[in-house]
Amino acid sequence: MARHKGLTFYEKKKRISREMIRDIFSTLFCCFAAVLVAFVLVFSMGMKISVIGVSMEPALYNGHEVLVNRFLYKILSPKRGDVIVFLPNGNPNSHYYLKRVVGLPGERIRITDGYVYINGELLEEDESFDIIADAGIAETELQLESDEYFVLGDNRNASEDSRSGNIGPVSKDTITGKAWFYLGDGLKDVGFVK
């Protein structure tokens, strides 16, 4: 009998074994567990709020739904440029405000000729922000305390923010969390929208 040399193209028939069924169920269980854990984490550490007003346009529009990360600022501090969610003066009867952090604890803030100065130096910002028409309480230099943040709306001339005497600098203990994603035309990361 002649021997065949070279490659053969015959396949062995695959049979479903107990091991294969166990692997399939194990993979399905892991996927289900991961989805369940993600769901629990988002709803235990996050919350959803609606944007009210035009103060954060063009980043966020009136009626956008925003997911808020309530856990992040328990371990980290807000950074310049973060969009934070807070209750003004900790008032539980107020709606949540969304504003962008401009000044950090310990800094000196002043608004002169429509521009923000931090510790005497001009804050370099995106050109899409309007020149500020009303400096409010920041017309004279403000010294932020060790737990205070100066916040502004992106729509600078249509925003009630830290320039307003009834809001002023935002204390860290009144900050609910960081605006994380918004639900407008799909899920978008707030941090990338300026």
Image (spheres, helix red, strand yellow):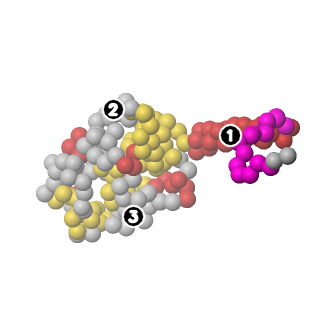
Check disc 2 and report the residue beneath it.
Answer: 62
Mark 2 residue type: Asn
Q: Name the residue rendered at 34%, 50% in the picture.
A: 100
Q: Does the stretch in magenta take in 7? A: yes
Q: Does the stretch in magenta take in 27? A: no
Secondary element at image label 2: loop
Mark 3 residue type: Pro
Farthest residue in the left direction? 113
Check disc 3 and report the residue beneath it.
Answer: 105
The magenta region covers 3-17
Q: Name the residue rendered at 33%, 66% in the picture.
A: 107
Percent x, y of residue 69: 51, 46
Check disc 1 and report the residue beneath it.
Answer: 31
Disc 2 vs disc 3: which is toward the camera?
A: 2
Mark 1 residue type: Cys
Q: Residue 154 vs residue 76: left or right?
A: left
Farthest residue in the front direction? 1
Magenta stretch secondary structure, dominant: loop
What is the tally of numbered marks visible in this picture? 3
Q: Are marks 2 and 3 in contact (CB under 8 Å)?
A: no
**Residue 166 visible in the current orientation:** no
- Label 3 CA crowd tier, 10 Å (few <14, some 14–19, many 20+): some
- If you read the primary sequence from the N terminus, does the residue marked by circle 2 or circle 3 appear first? 2
